[in-house]
Image (spheres, rainbow, N blue to C red):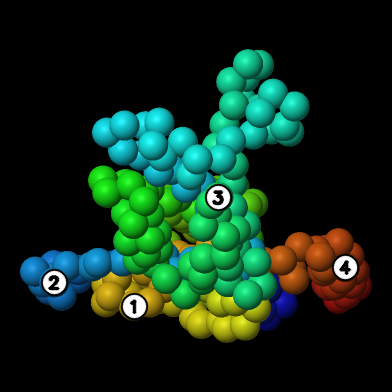
Amino acid sequence: MKLKRALFNIVSTAIVALLLTSCVSKKKILYTQNIETILTDQTTDYENIIQFDDVLRITVSSKNMETVAPYNATIGLAGAGMQAMGQARLLDYLVNSDGLIIFPQLGEVKVAGLTRIQAQEKLEKILRNFVTDAVVDIRIINFKYTILGEVNRPGTFTTSDNRITLIQALGMAGDLTIYGKRDSILVIRDTNGVQTSTRIDITAADFIYSDYYYLRQNDTIIIDPNKAQIQAAGFNRNASLWVSIASLLLSTIVVISNARR
């Protein structure tokens, strides 16, 4: 009887421990909690900063497109990356290590460190010395980010919007798994070759006003597994060992129990 009671106590304790470790507080799961209490009329005027190695697509337009044709360099039929046979496309501009692009007719123009809008205004100001109604549109076409860890679709993603939030990026990766740590998301950022990192808590609503609410080019987001997943991973690796030990103990207990009868 004492042996049976001991076994019952062991099994009961194991079940209770399992239930306790399986329960996860909703505070660790829900995003942007109590966001209604912190929202204000404050606007978020965000623009990505052009950096070294960015690839830009620049379009110059005017009422008379012939006057701006020299400033819209295109790749001809023999060029690589043709969208369709017989159709040229605009030349892309790489921002070099000095922060410069080589623009048709104008030569070197420094754009690194400027926002997209500021770079547009700078080019327009120069071009209007030659074409009074020149309008410039700039797009960063190599905007990409990487998401790794506890998400449903990890990988590297590109966007043509030039503006994407961390929440939207996680949505592109299929959202976090139930095992992902939502209160400690690591964002690694490269700013002109300088690496920085920070931890973001997306369960706290005030993160929407942080510098990491909007992603920048080449950001890397890493979702760590929560404690339960780490423990489960360790258990799974040693599952066969624990099963063998448990079987040996049970066999020993049964033999001893039978011997005492």
Residue at image coords 52%, 65%: 109
Q: Give the amino acid type for the residue marked by disc 2 in the picture.
A: Gln
Q: Which residue type does callout 3 highlight?
A: Pro
Which is closer to the viewer, label 4 or label 2?
2
Q: Residue at x 57, y 83 (%)?
A: 196
**Point 46% across, 36% down: residue:** 69
Q: Residues within 10 Å of mark 4 (few under 14, many from 20)?
A: few
Numbered label attached to residue 104: 3
Q: In the structure shown, which secondary structural element does the residue marked by tag 3 occupy?
A: loop
Q: Are marks 2 and 3 in contact (CB under 8 Å)?
A: no
Mark 4, mark 3: which one is toward the viewer?
3
Residue 233 at what x, y percent from top left?
Answer: 71, 66
Judged from the image, the secondary structure of the residue bearing numbered disc 2 is loop
Query: Residue 3's spot in the image, x, y percent?
Result: 72, 77
Label 2 crowd bin: few (<14), some (14–19), many (20+), radius 10 Å: few
Q: Is residue 183 above or below residue 62?
A: below
Q: Pinpoint residue 74: horizontal percent, then vertical percent.
A: 58, 35
Please give the residue where the numbered disc 2 appears in the rendered image.
Answer: 42
Residue at the spot of label 1: 210
Distance, label 1 to label 4, CA atoms, is: 47 Å
Q: How far, Cα to Cα, is label 4 from label 2?
A: 58 Å
Left or right relative to 82: residue 180 = left
CB atoms of marks 1 and 2 within 8 Å = no
Q: Nearer the viewer, residue 97 or 213?
A: 97
Q: Distance of mark 1 from mark 2, alpha carbons?
A: 13 Å
Are circles 1 and 4 on residues that touch, CB within 8 Å? no
The alpha-carbon separation of the residues under discs 2 and 3 comes to: 40 Å
Q: Picture quarter containing residue 147?
A: bottom right
